[in-house]
Image: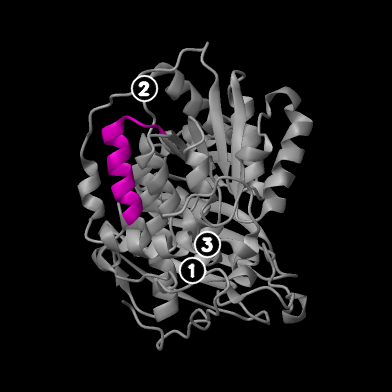
Amino acid sequence: MKSTTSIISPTAAPSALLTDRRDFLRSTSALALGGMALSFPAVLRGEPNGSKLKIGLVGCGGRGTGAAANALGADSNSELHAVADVFASQADGAINALSNQFKDRINVPADRRFAGLDGYQALLASGVDVVVLATPPGFRPGHLAAAVDAGKHIFCEKPMAVDPVGVRSVMESVRKSKEKGLSVVAGYCWRYARSRQEFFKAIHDGAIGDITSYYATYYTGPVKPMPPANARQAEWSDVEWQIRNWYNFSWLGGDGYVEQCIHSVDKVAWAFRDQPPLSCVATGGRQSPAEGGNIFDHMTAVYEYPNQVMATVGQRQIPNCFNENADYIQGTKGSGQLARGVSIRGEKNLRFREDDDAMYDQEHRDLFAAIRAGTPLNDGERMASSTLLGIMARVAAYTGQKITWEQILKSEEDLAPEQSLKWDSAFTPHATPVPGVYKFV
């Protein structure tokens, strides 16, 4: 496989990442999530405070640049050592933005700024110790696998895959990361918010009794609206156009439910101690007109847990509508809410001080502290499970069918392009799904 050794033109980018994804994911598709309960020996040697940790950023958009800033802020003896993005302008933009905040800790000369689809390979070979993976999530399984094989510590932005085949690849990478004693921290940031940690600990300790229902909302406007067709430049191939608008194509972004609402899904998983549901039924569709793209703009999923306990997650990304991002939990002895504050009503009323912004820093502080101490921190099992929980609902909504956990574990849905696809190829992804017509695989 060809490696990029310097910045190259995106229009000349090889197809390595696109073809490699399908090949690699297929090779790991026989794994099952239940096998991840194993423990593996930790062989990591701690990095003393005197050792400068070199950070590599893969995916230089807004979220990736922000995550790199969080990483640099988490450990004062670290530097940004290399960056990679499919577009050279994105790589340069990240460097410029981070240089303003961390002037003396950005050490990324021209020969460590990599562009093109295979730029991540050169970054992994550039001497970095920690990698931040923040590209469109359709590429995440392949990048995670490569980073683990290279023996790097990893911050892995959510979600970790866009289809069940990709999740099974992630599970295999997690298994290998544990064997190697690597730290893998997931971008499910609420897990690192101290108020949420205290809230869910109280829930698990019985503050509201047994959970009887969970209702979560993720109602907002369009996150990344699809531009009109006339915004496409004549020289852009189908693949380039779709990557530029990745959020609107399920093979790259996974749909809004999986890409954004996955935070709410992860909190549901947290409440139920990361034990999977029995099944899921979901509805959804697209009401806002758009020229191109193939994702839904609204979806509501109902997960069934044992003893007929239901968890409902509602997601909408339509302008000029009621907006809310909240969680309401009912129990046999009280209730809890993550809305207009963090509180519990029960035999003892509790209110938790919010620290929403700190979670983005805390997840990196914990990662770097684990690396320094030589005690690996690995979120891999739950990050794979929560991602699959989101995919389960999307598949249920797309197909109109009830999907069981066993079915989604074994599903062969693979949204990746065909192996012959190249950067300049014509490629038409599936149309916006029609429930009852779109088939479960």
Question: Between residues 357 and 279, which one lies in front from this camera angle?
Answer: 357
Q: Is residue 173 magenta?
A: yes
Q: Which residues are magenta?
A: 169-183
Total marks placed: 3
Q: Tell me which label, 3 or 2, sits earlier in the chain.
A: 3
Examine the rendered structure and indicate whether residue 402 appears above or below residue 359.
below
Q: Amino acid at mark 2?
A: Thr
Comparing labels 3 and 2, the label whose residue is closer to the camera: 3
Q: Tell me which label, 1 or 3, sits earlier in the chain.
A: 3
Residue 265: % across, % down? 46, 55
Q: Amino acid at mark 3?
A: Pro
Q: On the image, numbered disc 2 is attached to which residue?
A: 375
- Residue 187 in view: no
Rendered image quadrant of residue 292 = bottom right
Q: Amino acid at mark 1?
A: Trp
Q: Which mark is residue 14?
A: 3
Indicate the secondary structure of the residue bearing disc 3: loop
Indicate the secondary structure of the residue bearing disc 2: loop
Residue 317: % across, % down? 64, 67
Main SS, magenta residues: helix
Whole-Å distance between the Cαs marked 2 and 1?
35 Å
The residue shown at (31%, 76%) is: 441
Whole-Å distance between the Cαs marked 3 and 2?
38 Å
Q: Tell me which label, 2 or 1, sits earlier in the chain.
A: 1
The residue shown at (31%, 58%) is: 277
Considering every residue shown, the one lying at the far bottom of the view is 437
Examine the rendered structure and indicate whether residue 225 appears above or below residue 110.
below
Q: On the image, numbered disc 1 is attached to which residue?
A: 251
Question: Between residues 143 and 8, which one lies in front from this camera angle?
Answer: 8
Q: Is residue 382 left or right of residue 41?
A: right
Q: Give the class, few, some or many, for how many residues have Cα within 10 Å of label 3's Cα (few <14, many ≥20).
A: many
